Amino acid sequence: MDRDEVIKKLRGIKPGRIREHAVKVEDVYHPVKEAFARVTGLDLLDFNTNTARNAFKRLGFEVSRLSTS
């Protein structure tokens, strides 16, 4: 997985509901696990949020946590 692949696979995709963690790709916020699953082809149950967050951070994407207040 590289930065260009992430952008290509998420371009034009309508993001789902963000519950807590999001990744920003081309000015669009995506649920971090949903985005990681789409890019890698993995099932959502085959990885945890930290795996997805760390992978996107390593590629230079902005990863955010929504405030729970």
Image: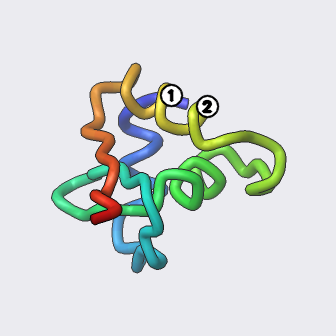
Q: Residue at x 28, y 26 (%)?
A: 60
View extreme (top): residue: 58
What distance separates the C-alpha of mark 1 from that of mark 2?
Answer: 6 Å
SS at circle 1: helix
Q: Quadrant of the C terminus?
A: bottom left
Q: Residues within 10 Å of mark 2 (few under 14, many from 20)?
A: few
Return the residue at label 2. 51
Q: Position of residue 24 (x, y in %)?
A: 27, 51
Residue type (three-letter) at the residue carrying disc 1: Ala
Q: On the rendered structure, is 18 left or right of 33?
A: left
On the image, the x and y values in percent for residue 10 come to 42, 60
Cβ atoms at labels 1 and 2 below 8 Å apart: yes
Q: Position of residue 16 (x, y in %)?
A: 48, 77
The quarter in which the N terminus is drawn is: top right
Q: Secondary structure at mark 2?
A: helix
Which of 21/58 is in front?
Answer: 21
**Res 57 quadrant in image:** top left
Q: Residue furthest front?
A: 69
Residue drawn at x 35%, y 73% is: 12
Residue 4 lies, with reference to residue 17, above or below; the image says above
**Number of marks:** 2
Q: Which residue occupies the foreground of this view, 51 or 68? A: 68
Q: Residue at x 29, y 62 (%)?
A: 29
Find residue 55 and name its label: 1
Compare residues 6 and 54 and report the one nearer the observer: 54
Name the mark nearer the viewer: 1 or 2.
Answer: 2
What's the mark number on residue 31?
none
Q: Is residue 15 above or below residue 56?
A: below
Type of amino acid at the residue the image marks with label 2: Thr
